[in-house]
Amino acid sequence: MMSGTMSEIHDPNAPQSTSDLANTGRMDVSAVLDEGRGVVVPESVGEVVFNLDDVHVFYGDFEAVRDVTMQIGRNEITAFIGPSGCGKSTLLRSFNRMNDLIPGARVEGLLAYHGFDIYAPDVDPIEVRRRIGMVFQKPNVFPKSIYENVAYGPKVNGMKVNMDDLVEECLTRAALWDEVKDDLKKSAYALSGGQQQRLVIARCIAVKPEVILMDEPCASLDPIATAKIEDLMKELAADYTIVIVTHNMQQAARVSDRTAFFTADVDAQGVRHGRLVEYGPTRSIFTAPNDPRTEDYISGRFG
Amino acid sequence: MTTATASSAPGGLNPLRQTKPRYGEAVIRGILVLAAAVSLFTTFGIVISVLIPSLEFFAEISFTEFLFTTTWTPLFANPQYGVLPLLMGTFVITVIAVLVAIPLGLGSAIYLSEYASPKARKVLKPTLEVLAGIPTVVFGFFALEFITVYVLKPIFPDIQVFNALSAGLVMGIMIIPTIASLSEDAMAAVPSGLRDGAYALGATKRQTALRVVVPAALSGIVAAFVLGVSRAIGETMIVTIAAGLQPNMTLNPLQGMQTMTSYIAAAGSGDVPTGSIEYKSIFAVGLLLFIITFVMNMISIRLVRKYRQAYQ
């Protein structure tokens, strides 16, 4: 399963030379500023995993996300914040081509993963999704046992591994092992919401992705379960690149290294388009935002 | 503190009392109870009307002869009442029908729910439902005049004109819409989050459909299968027309067979004198048929409940 149409993409587990990444992935920050897109990237993100250049996302004729240019750094937690309808989830779902499943959805511009265009015609979305996993708002455990939930991804990807070891490793990594080790054969639906979400994270890392996309992962959880997921995210950031969409600004401030603030602009026809307003280290976004719209949003004056 | 609230005021009327009678409530309640009672009493009435002649039948013919002997000739001069040939006919034709209907029905359901574009679904689903609206008598003649003559005869030259195979195949086609439509409903009810979860792990469409959506919809799919089987067991017109009316103790589908239903239809529409043992045999076979479908329904309810429990 590893070889195939996208074999030129880096295996996340393989040693990578930083020089070719620097050549293909990293963008000159001054160029972004010069083009006047209103995006301020105060410092380099380091090793670039995602490079977005002038990305637009459409649903049919509707342009949900307009003109996003940014880079996402390796082993960082990047938070997307912004009011409802600002396109942040839509943009996140285009990182692993989940938008392909929605008829009429398409992406324009360059969305590159380690320098390779995710939307190039020869790219297999299945290979993309194996490397770029996703956790959703509602814990979408499968109607199977806890064990089978974790084993599903490795099985469909034909991974030759000792499944018992892998299941234990992933559940341990997701801080769930001690709670479920005696109930692995039980239905995943028997778990609480917070446990289900940690099971989904375990299931996600079982296919050994490099990136985990999280679309409001704590939206349906109580504060205690949320705190557990946030702790888990910080631990996982040592090995994974995490991009999280959240409505909870405190969460973005607590967990993320970098924050991107999106908002919805209304054009002359009265149609809303999501746009990136400001992107930078989380501390500066929350303490000294450059754009008055960011300041209004984080101080609760709108959205 | 003495407060003169309305409710505690001595001699005053409680303002919370009901002031207007609500006749409408009682009338609606009565109508609804009546509606529910009609189906209950009908079922009860059918059971009684089948049970009484059947008991009279078993007063004359032993259970052992009825259930374990292999000749069914109630209308002959020397009548014999071994129901096994009718059971065998029902069994063979139902198995053929199920072998046709389950793969094709489930296949169409998976295609409609997981693969078809919205445009294709818009055309295909109503077409499938038209198939469900065709009268079974039309299916019967389709089996007899087309399937047997133009499809089966060239393959099996020694096939009988009336045969179980054509009846079973066409009955299978008839129950495809039942199985497809109910299975598709069950799969469409699977939350799209489960599909997203599978795709996000790098699953293909096939792996998502077969390993996530179908297992998640299993209770509905099993219910669809059992309903399809029940329809096959109870179907009368196709077998009466196409399978012949010879009670035939055989597993060879190229021969004619009689099912429980087609015996009931044929004997019931013939000139059997009321109250005779032949007449009562109709009800005995009917009772057996009733018990079989009743057990099938119990099994389906059990299965549905079992899978539901596992997945909630």
Image (cartoon, rainbow, N blue to C red):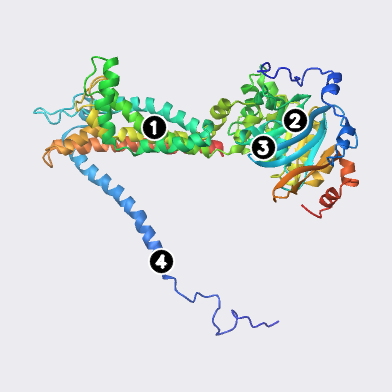
Three-letter code for the amino acid on which mark 4 is drawn = Ala
Residue position marked by numbered label 3 in the rendering: A196
Three-letter code for the amino acid on which mark 3 is drawn = Gln
Q: Label 2 crowding class (10 Å Cα cut-off): few <14, some 14-19, many 20+? A: many
At which x and y percent is residue A137?
68, 41
Which residue is painted at 25% across and 14% down in the image? B157
Which of the two discs, 4 and 1, labels the residue nearer the N terminus? 4
**Closer to the camera in the image, A50 or A187:** A50
Q: Chain of mark 1?
A: B
Residue position marked by numbered label 4 in the rendering: B26
Q: Nearer the viewer, mark 3 or mark 1?
A: 1
Residue position marked by numbered label 1 in the rendering: B176
Which of the two discs, 2 and 3, labels the residue nearer the N terminus? 2
- Return the mark for residue A111: 2
Q: CA distance from mark 3 to mark 1?
A: 38 Å
At which x and y percent is residue B190?
55, 38
- Labels 2 and 4 in the same subunit: no
Asked whether the beta carbons under mark 1 and mark 2 sit within 8 Å of each other, the answer is no
**Closer to the camera in the image, A52 or B61:** A52
